[in-house]
Amino acid sequence: MTDFSAIKKRFPIFTNQPNLVFLDNGASTQKPQAVIDAITELYTKYYANVHRGIYKNSERATDMFEAVRGKVQKLIGAAHEQEIIFTKGTTESLNTIAYTWGERNIQAGDEIVVSLLEHHANFIPWQQLCQRKGATFKIAMPEKDGTLSVEAVKKQLTPKTKLVAITHVSNVLGVITPVRAITAAAHKVGAKVVVDAAQSIAHLPVNVQDIDCDFLVFSGHKMYGPTGVGILYGKRELLENMEPFMFGGNMINEVTIERSTWAPVPEKFEGGTPAIAEVIALAPAIDLLQEVGFDAIRAHEKELLTYALQQLATLPDITIYGPQDADKISGVISFNLDTVHPHDTGTLVDEKDVAIRVGHHCAQPLTNFLGVIGTCRASFAIYNTKADVDRLINALKHAQKVFK
Ligand SMILES: Cc1ncc(COP(=O)(O)O)c(C=O)c1O
C-alpha cells in the first residue's frame, strides 16, 4: 500500500508551510524535491544549450533532454519517440495544431466539433480557426449533470466534420469523457481527433494508441513538473505532412536565399532554444507518477473524492456541480455556498490556509450553462489526504459563519 502522507514529505512547500492545504492542483501542482534538484543540478553542474555543441556539457544536456522524449513516449504509450514534441504547455500545443494542421486542412464549409466542457484553450483556437476559414463551429452539449455522452458528440458529426477536439477530464466538473468511443465515432466520418489531457495526465492512465486519437496535449506543470514545458503528441504521418509553425534555429534541413527545407519531426516543430531545464526536470515528475502507479493514484483519488463529496453534502446551503460519483469524475469538485459569493468563499478559506480556485476556470461557456458566475473548485493531487478535506470543510464552515 502506498503511503500517501509520506509522499507529501517529498514536496518541500509542505515542510516550509506546514499549515498549507493545497487544493488548487487543477491550476498547477506543487513540485517535489526531485524536480527542483534536477533544475539545480543542470544549472550548477553541466548547463549548456542542446542540439548544438560538440563539447561534453552540451552532449550531456542533450542526452538528458532527449531521454525525456522517450519517457513521455512510454508514459502515453506512443508508437514512436518522434511523435513527442516539446512545447511551452497545453495552450501552445493546441494553438500549434490550429495554426499548422488547421490552416492546411480546414476549408470553408468544413465543420469542427468541440464540447461545451472545454477549457478556453481547447475552444477559442477552433472557434477562431472556423472564423478565419468560413468553417462551422459546432458544440456537443453535456447532460444536465455535466457528463458528456458519445451520442451527444455523434449528433454533431457529419461527413463535413474535419476535427473533433475534446477534453479527457473537465477542469470545472472533473467529468471523465469517453474519449476512446468519441475518437472511434469521429474517425468513422473521417475526422481527426484532438484530446486535451491537461487534467487527466496526472490522474488517469493515458494511452494514445488505445484511444487512437490523432493529437493529444498536456502541460508539465499540472503533473508535478516545471512550468514552461508541455507536450504535443501527434501521429507520425500526420506530423510529417504538417508545415512547421515557428521558423528559426534548429528546425531546418537547409536554408538558401531562395528557399528553406525542414528538419524531420520532432525538430521541425521545435524551432529555437527549448525550455532545457524544464524538459529535463519533467523526468523526475514522470518517474514519481510511474513509481506510485496509476492504479494506486486513482484508488487514492477516488477515496478522497468520495470522502469530500460526503463531507461537502453535510454542509447546509451548498450546491455541488457535476455528477457526485467518484467513478465518473477525476481530480476536481466544483461547488458554491448558496449565501456566499465564490470569491468571498475563496478569500475566507484562505484565511484558514486552504487554497482553492474560484471563478469561471477559463471555461465560460460551461459556467454559463451551469447558470452561475463562477464556482469554488477543490482539486486534488497525490499529496492530499482526508485531513485536508476536513480542513476544507472547517474553512467552509468559517465562511458560512461570517456571512450568516
Ligand atoms: C483542461 C485544460 N486544458 C487546457 C489548459 C491550459 O493549460 P496551460 O495553461 O498549461 O496551457 C488547462 C489549464 O487549466 C486545462 O485545465
Image: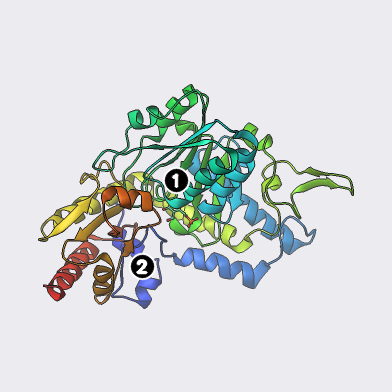
Q: Is residue 72 above or below residue 17?
A: above
Q: Is residue 77 above or below residue 219?
A: above
Q: Position of residue 201 (x, y in %)?
A: 43, 48
Query: What residue sits 54% from the left and 40% below the top?
Result: 130
| Comparing labels 2 and 1, the label whose residue is closer to the camera | 1
Element under disc 1: loop
Q: Is residue 173 visible?
A: no
Element under disc 2: loop
What is the crowding at mark 1: few (fewer than 14 residues within 10 Å), some, or many (at least 20)?
many
In front here: 188 or 56?
188
Task: Tell me which numbered mark, 2 or 1, is placed earlier along the sequence.
Answer: 2
* Residue to which mark 1 is pinned: 197
* Residue to which mark 2 is pinned: 9
Label 1 CB-ligand 1 distance < 8 A: no
Q: Report the colour scheme.
A: rainbow
Cβ atoms at labels 2 and 1 below 8 Å apart: no
396 horizontally vs 111: left or right: left
The type of residue carrying mark 1 is: Ala
In front here: 403 or 262?
403
Dividing the image into four equal quarters, which quarter contains ligand 1? bottom left
33 horizontally vs 18: left or right: right
Q: Is residue 267 visible?
A: yes
Query: What residue sits 75% from the left and 54% below the top?
Result: 248
